[in-house]
Amino acid sequence: MDKSTFESIEKSISPERLAAYKADGASNEIALARYIYNIELSESLYPIINIFEVTLRNSIDKALAKFFDVKEWNDAMFLTETERRMIDEAKTKIVQKNQTYSHSRLVSELTLGFWVALMGKKYNSQKFQFFIIKNILHGCPSEQKSTISVQKNLNEIRFLRNRIAHHRRILHWTDLEQKHDLILDFIRWMSQDMHKIAIHNDTFETVYKNGIAPFELFIEKDFST
């Protein structure tokens, strides 16, 4: 790849973002191959993260409605200012979309951060948290069902999800396979049926197994000088 071609691509991606892929002294070609491979890895994880997030929020919603015996549980429970603000922001988004407010729309607009926060340490003293764990993680083994373990797992998944959402680098993670398996496990603990759908849409193992080689070949073939 000639210098001008790389500089043109680098300008589109940004030198700062590409720098992370060549910090070890890698060539321009390898840096671009890594960048493309990272996109492919992120894309392969998106379906199961999507299924995880949808299943989690709807499972927690149903558990809270049952616990408080009211559909609009958000008006019946103690929430900190941060989570109250998240709810207000979600309601504002519904209005901005010219949609009629409904509880189901509120649930879908609330971010993953909101649902993970409900399971966080600040709500450890709230009885609803234990109720949620007991009622949504049907298939979770006992050693993984403690509040500490659930919080740890949810935070790890959320961190990975946010890196992917912001197009950050993940290909250097040595435990990416374990993170992938954790997401699938969490889906299975909540719903066997959703786990089947997740498995059907999962391409991560193939992409991860093939590694960076296909993208190095693409760079060599399509950008050879």
Image (spheres, rainbow, N blue to C red):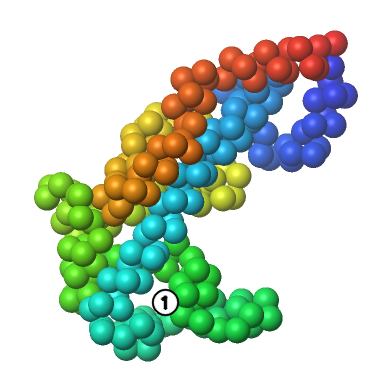
Instruction: Measuring from the top left, give residue 157's x and y in whole percent.
Output: 39, 49
Badge 1 amino acid: Glu
In the rendered image, the residue lying farthest to the bottom is: 75
Front in this rendered view, residue 195 or 18: 195
Picture quadrant where residue 119 is located: bottom left
In the rendered image, the residue lying farthest to the left is: 142
Which residue shows up at 68% across the image and 81% down it? 98
Picture quadrant where residue 63 is located: bottom left
Report whether 174 appears left or right of 222. Answer: left
Q: Is residue 198 above or below residue 158?
A: above
Report whether 129 appears left or right of 221. Answer: left
Picture quadrant where residue 82 is located: bottom left
Instruction: Measuring from the top left, give residue 25's x and y in whole percent.
Output: 61, 20
Front in this rendered view, residue 42 or 132: 132
In this rendering, the count of numbered labels is 1
What is the secondary structure assignment of the residue under circle 1? helix
In the rendered image, the residue lying farthest to the right is: 4
Instruction: Measuring from the top left, give residue 202's x and y in whole percent.
Output: 46, 36
Q: Is residue 133 above or below residue 39?
A: below
Front in this rendered view, residue 8 or 147: 147
Report whether 124 appears left or right of 115. Answer: left
Instruction: Measuring from the top left, give residue 162's x and y in whole percent.
Output: 50, 52
Q: Quadrant of the C terminus?
A: top right
Q: Is residue 73 above or below residue 56?
A: below
Tell me, yes or no, if residue 195 can be seen here: yes
Q: Quadrant of the N terminus?
A: top right
**Residue on which the image places disc 1:** 83
Which residue shows up at 37% across the image and 59% down it? 56
Which residue shows up at 47% across the image and 31% down it? 204
Which residue shows up at 42% across the image and 68% down it? 114
Tell me, yes or no, if residue 31 can be seen here: no
Q: Residues within 10 Å of mark 1 (few under 14, many from 20)?
A: some
